[in-house]
Amino acid sequence: MGCTISPMLFVMALEVILKAAEGRTGHANLGGGCSMPPLKAFMDDTTVICSKEDETRRMLKRLDVLVA
């Protein structure tokens, strides 16, 4: 059995990492007037959504630096 506070600590740490990785990146334009934040996370799954491939590469590089 793990500590009952462990999931909360994980979520708090992940939130800091995701906010730092997002930086000043705006919402991804999905077309049709829809937009979405560039990073979405649920539990230990993270999704990167960007309008352009180079934005995605930059976001992944920032994440790599932050978690290394």
Image (spheres, rainbow, N blue to C red):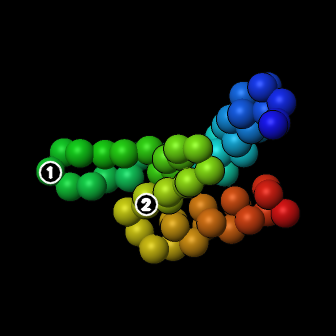
Amino acid on which the number 1 mark rests in the picture? Gly
Residue 58's x, y, as percent? 61, 67
Vertical comparison of 56 with 33: above or below: below
Q: Residue at x 38, y 52 (%)?
A: 28
* Count of picture labels: 2
Vertical comparison of 20 with 61: above or below: above
Q: Secondary structure at mark 2?
A: loop
Residue 30's x, y, as percent? 27, 55
Residue 65's x, y, as percent? 79, 63
Q: Nearer the viewer, residue 52 or 18?
A: 18
Q: Is residue 24 visible?
A: no
Badge 2 vs badge 1, beta-carbon distance below 8 Å = no
Q: Which mark is residue 45?
A: none
| The C terminus lies in quadrant | bottom right
Upstream in the sequence, badge 2 or badge 1?
A: 1
Q: Residue at x 43, y 58 (%)?
A: 49
Q: Quadrant of residue 52?
A: bottom left
Q: Between marks 2 and 1, how big is the CA–CA gap? A: 15 Å
Q: Secondary structure at mark 1?
A: loop
Q: Residue furthest left?
A: 32
Residue 35's x, y, as percent? 31, 45
Amino acid on which the number 2 mark rests in the picture? Cys
Q: Which mark is residue 32?
A: 1
Q: Residue at x 81, y 37 (%)?
A: 1
Q: Residue at x 74, y 65 (%)?
A: 64
Left or right: 34, with 57 as reference point: left
Q: Is residue 38 visible?
A: yes
**Residue behind mark 2:** 50
> Dot 2: few (<14), some (14–19), or many (≥20) neighbours within 10 Å?
many
